[in-house]
Image (cartoon, coloured by chain):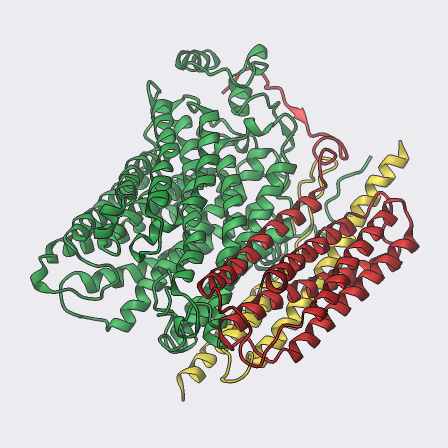
Chain colours: A red, B green, C yellow
Amino acid sequence: MTTAEPQRVELPPPGRGRHEAGLPTPLVGMLLFIASEVMFFGGLFAAYFNARAAHAGAWHPPEGGELDMPLAAVLTAILVSSSFTMQFGVAAIRRGDQRGLRMWVGLTLVLGVLFLLGQLYDYSRLGFGIGDGIFGTTFYTLTGFHGAHVFGGAVGLTIMLARALQGQFSTANHVAVEAVSIYWHFVDVVWIALFTTIYILR
Amino acid sequence: MATTTLNPRAETYQRSWVLDWLTTVDHKKIGILYIVNSFFFFFAAGILALVIRSELAVPGLQFLDEATYNQAFTMHGTIMIFLFIVPVLSGFANYIVPLMLGAPDMAFPRINALSFWLLPVGGLLIFSGYLFGGAAAEGWTGYNPLTQAKYSPGPGTDLWLIGLTLVGTASILGSINFIATIFKMRAPGMTLFRMPIFVWTVLVTAVLILLATPVFTAGLIALFIDRNYGGSFFDPNVGGSPILWQHIFWFFGHPEVYIVILPAMGVVSEVLPVFSRKPLFGYRAFVFATVGIGLLSFSVWAHHMFTTGFVFLPFFSFMTALIAVPTGVKFFNWMATMWRGKLSLTTPMLFALGFLSMFLIGGLSGVMLSSPAVDFHLQDTYFVVAHLHYVFFGGSVFGVFAATYYWFPKMTGRKLNEGLGKVHFWMHFIGFNLAFFPMHQLGISGMPRRVADYSPDAGWTVLNSMSTAGAFLIAASIFPFLINVVATFINGERAGDDPWEGNTLEWATSSPPPPYNFDRLPPIHSERPLFFLTHGHGHAADRPADVDETPEDDVERRGGAE
Amino acid sequence: MTDATVGYLVIGIAIVFVLGLVFALSSREGRLQQARPTPPPGVHLPSGSFLPVVLAIGAALLGAGFAFRPQGAIANLFLAVPGFVVLVGSIFAWVRAAGREWRESEHAADDDAAGH
């Protein structure tokens, strides 16, 4: 046993020290989550590239099916604009503009839902399914999981909108909006990669 | 001033303990839940191992048919890896890391609880295959086309896929929690380079989990689509590729084995200095070696696929040999830690020394396998089974038992009995080597793995019987352990805050700690804050962190403080 | 009786047994205890919550719905739909509870700042 009373330090009072430096913890969590989702899509993309390389020269939708490039381009425009509206929403709440936040988040949600409806409409007119050979499988798996992530983002936006309507956000306290916006941008980036890979590079 | 913020709904009378444990978000209780749950799965998968070894003891199919045997080794591997070894290390990390950081809890306590509860439900889903026409039976590696619906019909494999998806999600959520906690919730004064090595290994492990497990999830889902919705990912008849499955699986599967070993190395890095009365030699080298192993682990996966003919052998062989280098650095540093130290051979120390010797053998057999010329002969033989058990069992499981004996006093306030601990260790050590060393020779003699039976003319019978005897000795060694645990709970020797004279912050609070962990913290100026607290003079506590102690200093200071 | 029916029966009985055990044990009176030790100022410990268990069970039901897919269907809807409902419901409840706790602690900090 020690003889002298060891020196101990009181825990620091709140609001100082650990939490203030660097990114807020919920944002750190969201960024890490997005890192894991990037790897998830990475696995799916790896499958796509592997299949495409193995079928070089014969990589196209099965008989009777065709990719709808114009519709996909419209969907891309919708999703990219929704990222802009989302960011305007974040800028709004950063300066304390409650009405602006509600408007931009609402608009982002509308665009997101439009994207999903457009994706479903595309699926209904494609002429091939997930079980129609390797092209169909990779196409539906990639776009389907992306759509599922858009759906998750839409759920998040709905919650943000509900909380914004109740006035729960302020300049000092809106980390949830920032987190959802980062997720939404991620979903947009994945779509751009998908669109480029599937529709442009073919 | 904000007063205490214990939630006003927290009652002041004790609720039933069932509700308490079901709804807890306290990292310490969650850690214990992880550990207890994992040991249940350990025993279940261990019984499967005994089933396997009983069947293989002598030639001829005595108890099982091939289909049941296949389920046995598949479930043994899957449960041991995903439901025992990874979660039990996660449980120790959950309990200890916030304490080592001087934090009151993890960054996301409720998600922490969710990560745990997904484990028993996922494990039950996987096991429930037995009730529905047979559990998964294609090996824990799930190779195609065997896992396709036409060769493995029935829900067993689907349950395996879904269960592992849930377990994988739990892991990923846990890794987010650990990384956020380590970066955001360290006590003042604890820079990254003053964190204990155990925390560093947990950090790198968490990054590996974060980046590798989602790839596995993608593969599991792709296989599910193949089996159930007519997908074509891995079926060559419709344009898919079975080799793609192997790539996806092993891109995850190799980092997975480092996920399994790094926290155990972290435990050993905590135990050795305490029971050598010397600081860890080469702290920074340890950090860089751990990070290096983490990075390199993503570059070696195809060494599991050398014999497919589709792998660029020189690259993967070189990277596999390369990853032995940081591991070697760690070995030299562990030995340098003990060199000229005052060793006390307590049970945790024995298990740590067992780790060093057994993992060395496993690592060496791994380096042998990194040579394609050797691997072409030994792939899918018992040599690989020997290698993987020496690293998984001789490495990680020995690390788990070292952690158990080391931190049991902190978690329960009582010390496990040393006599029974030593009986456990020696039975375990001898049984382990008896069970798995002969497998090296069996593999070299050509015995393939995953076979339910073998010819009496092959000359493999004696070694197989020895191996079975060893397996039963391992099983027997669990009894002194369990008796020890139960007896200690009933009437064990009480432990104070710091029964081992440790170096790190978990020993600076009561055993067990209060719900919020710390009333006060010592000043943190080094990676051994508690050492300086108990042994420090004023100037020693202010000494910069990177000045290494000499052994004489420690002995002198300890003698002076008595 | 087919394999599957036996399986469902075993699982059903096991669930009822476990739930009954939990109910019986949790209904017992707790002992009166002195107030729990209070954390130092500024440390906020969230209270316990059922939601992690509930969410895990919802996810497992949803997963089981897919694993026990009948021929020709996307999933076993008897399992998948309740699972999905429980999953989404617990996510909503979780977000609401987390938001409420965050605001409670934020208001304490705001009062702190204002009170200086």
Q: Nearer the viewer, residue B311 or B41?
A: B311
In the image, is residue B549 above or below residue A14? above
In percent of width and height, residue B148 lies at 40, 72
In percent of width and height, residue B209 lies at 51, 49
In the image, is residue B200 above or below residue B76? above
Which residue extends farthest left? Answer: B457
Label count reads: 0
Quarter of the image holding residue A172? top right
Quarter of the image holding residue B39? bottom left
State the residue at coordinates (40%, 58%): B41
Q: Nearer the viewer, residue B94 or A57?
A: A57
Which residue extends farthest bottom? Answer: C1
Q: Nearer the viewer, residue B188 or B486?
A: B188
Apparent side of residue B3 relative to residue B149 in the rendered image (left or right): right
State the residue at coordinates (80%, 54%): A84
Apparent side of residue B483 relative to residue B439 in the rendered image (left or right): right
| Residue C35 visible in the shown view | no
| Residue A192 visible in the shown view | yes
In percent of width and height, residue B309 lies at 31, 56
In percent of width and height, residue B392 lies at 34, 47
Q: Nearer the viewer, residue B59 or A100?
A: A100
Which residue extends farthest front? Answer: A57
